[in-house]
Image (spheres, rainbow, N blue to C red):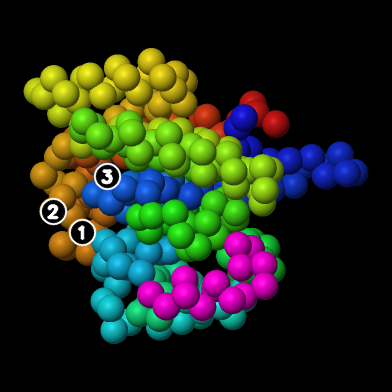
Amino acid sequence: MLCLQRHLSHSGAIITRPLILAVANQKGGVGKTTTAVNLATSLAIAGLPVLLIDMDPQGNASTGLGVARNQRFGGTYKLLMEGSPGRETIRPTLVRNLSLIASDIDLAGAEVELVSENRREFHLKAALAGSPALSEFSVIVLDCPPGLGLLTLNALVAATGVVVPLQCEFYALEGISSLMHTIEAVRRRFNPALRLCGILLTMFDRRNSLSGLVEKDARDHFGDWVFDVSIPRNVRVSEAPSHGKPVLLYDAKSPGATAYTALGAEIINKENVVVPGHVTAHV
């Protein structure tokens, strides 16, 4: 049940497709946007061409990469409602190899507008599939809004895998079952290629016994679907967005940055992603 980046064509030749990861959880405040920004950064620093698409009308991922609100023209709204993005929609970031499609102010109305659209669940998938400008990217990361509305549904229909941040607090596991049912329903009805790539424990505090209990429950219940790495509660992770930087740029030696670097490496290994210039035994 892996989300492989390399596939065999009908002729037997190896072709590459981007790994599309939706970072999703219907609960807010679980570290979803922080994970999307820093996972994308980690993969880019590892040498992969990465595109982060901010699917959240709050636009926190765009803020976390230093894009001012008055500069977010032609962003995710245009992508969803007008089709495949041109290169003018895709902007560079402070991180080498990492590009961004920003959340603009019009995205707040997209969910209402999509209700009356034909094949409303497939707008993002069609836009991504029809864009030559996206062929240069090895990984596309989708930062989903909290909730399970049409914006999140579009992300799940377009994705090949889902990364689920799980906050190490008492009620966290209760919401996961609902999300898992949604992922399975999307897989059955709209996107047979969709798979759970992993559950990421966030805001982990080894000094707090509750974090250990949540980790034990998660690993007992979900087994290998829980990533080996967990993201510690770390003030540098919280400070970085206010400076318009991922924590891997803000303080590369902090525990949070080290953890997100390890997450990127774990996903590259787990998903058999081919890093340009690196020799791999996977096919």
Is the residue 230 above or below the residue 51 in the image?
Answer: above
**Kind of element beneath mark 3:** loop
Is the residue 75 above or below the residue 216 in the image?
Answer: below
Q: Quadrant of the N terminus?
A: top right
Q: Nearer the viewer, residue 6 or 61?
A: 61
> Horizontal placement of 5 versus 204: left or right?
right
Q: Nearer the viewer, mark 3 or mark 2?
A: 3
**Kind of element beneath mark 2:** helix
First in residue order: circle 1 vs circle 3: 3
Main SS of the magenta part reads helix
Instruction: Verify whether residue 157 appears in magenta.
Output: no
Residue type (three-letter) at the residue carrying disc 3: Val
Q: Which mark is residue 241?
A: 1
Are there few (<14), some (14-19), or many (20+) residues within 10 Å of tag 1? many
Point 43% across, 64% down: residue: 55
The magenta span reads 108-123
Viewer can see residue 5: no
Is the residue 266 above or below the residue 152 in the image?
Answer: above
Q: CA distance from mark 3 to mark 2?
A: 16 Å
Residue type (three-letter) at the residue carrying disc 1: Pro
Residues at circles 2 and 1 in contact by the CB criterion of under 8 Å: yes
The residue that disc 2 covers is 239
> Horizontal placement of 16 versus 243: left or right?
right
Q: Nearer the viewer, residue 183 or 4?
A: 183
The residue that disc 3 covers is 30
Residues at circles 1 and 3 in contact by the CB criterion of under 8 Å: no
